[in-house]
Image: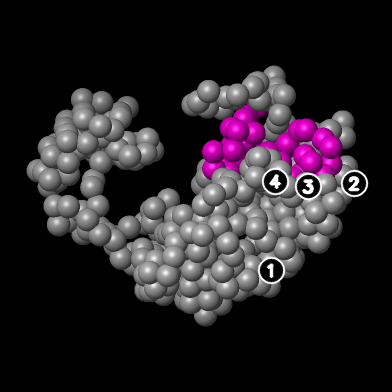
Amino acid sequence: MIDRARLAELRASEEKRFIELHPKSGQLFEKSKVNMPDGVPMSWMAKWPGAYPIFVEEAKGATFVDVDGNTYIDFCLGDTGSMTGHSPDAVVTAIREQAGKGMSAMLPTKDASDVSADLASRFNLPFWQFTVSATDANRHAIRYSRLITGKSKVIVIDRCYHGSVDESFATLDKKGKTVAREGNIGAPVDLDLTTRVVAFNDLAGMKKALANNDVAAILMEPAMTNVGIVLPADGYLKEVEKLAKKYEALLIIDETHTISVGPGGMTAQLGLCPDFLTIGKAIGGGFPTGAFGMQKHVADSIKKLVELEVIDTGGVGGTLAANALSLAAMRASLSKVLTAENFERMIKLGDRWADGV
């Protein structure tokens, strides 16, 4: 039997200690509530435990320091936005140097050529485009999939996470119908109009979802990462590839989190061949960015179907996408941080952590 009175007593004691340790954060929180809902600049930041959010002064490597001078070992790392550590030296230097030479001209830089070549080599998809987030990369891949296939539906995995992509905030109710997930804010349409939901590792369910031949894309992570970690069954992803080809749906693999397994993510590790690959977060070393790669047949179809004169009103791209600053950050992160040698060290540290807990 849980002693709830004792739990409440412990909670009150810890909250008192929290407030004593974080007086400046408390003052900033009260000031911030005047102009920001819940006193935070982005709603998720209000979810952290404690009487109020901790305000950060600086972050470097695996630690950050709050405005009260408390130092923390950071196991969250910006929810993987700084997966390789806060402010890697190479990325800081690249951003500093590029900032003085121009941040965004809506024209390509040499870094764009270098970064696209690096990504093509890692993931074995020859053509790349850049966005301001992995969310946008997923959105653009879905739009292109609908254009190429002439179909409308998108398959996602139950309890998946792909950023704030409308089609992905769906789940199955007890009757097996696709419905909006709890917390889905202002869904534009009923989710069963746009989305089919399949459980991870369920090949029979995937085949059934494809059977009507109205699916434009399958959007999925190679391993689920937002409900703990759920690994693919042996051969599962290769079978999904085969089903996608059979039913003429395009497969979009989201490697934003699973890049953690190695330089080419699980796509390279398992020899996958998706039509699109999306990624963000770590490839910018914590700087906002995203990218999507595509196979040649996809790029050829886009070139044939898209009228370049009106591409800027087509729902793909953006004024700040592929800006010079983000490309500099990606170039440094990919060439100096997300290297095979560094992954070997990071994976050993991860194994040590896993063994310890």
Whether residue 120 is visible to the viewer of this picture, yes or no, is: yes
Q: Residues within 10 Å of mark 4 (few under 14, many from 20)?
A: few
Residue at position x 81%, y 61% in the image: 296
- Closer to the camera in the image, 334 or 324: 324
Give residue 306's mark.
3
Nearer mark to the viewer, of 3 and 1: 3
Q: Residues within 10 Å of mark 3 (few under 14, many from 20)?
A: some
Q: What amino acid type is highlighted by mark number 4?
A: Ile
- Choose the circle earlier in sequence order: 2 or 3: 2
- Front in this rendered view, residue 75 or 298: 298
Pick the front one: 335 or 306 = 306
**Residue that carries the numbered disc 4 in the rendered image:** 311
Q: Are marks 3 and 4 in contact (CB under 8 Å)?
A: yes
Alpha-carbon distance for marks 2 and 3?
Answer: 25 Å
**Where residue 162 sits in the image (x, y, percent)?**
58, 44
Q: Amino acid at mark 3?
A: Val
Numbered mark located on residue 246 in the image: 2
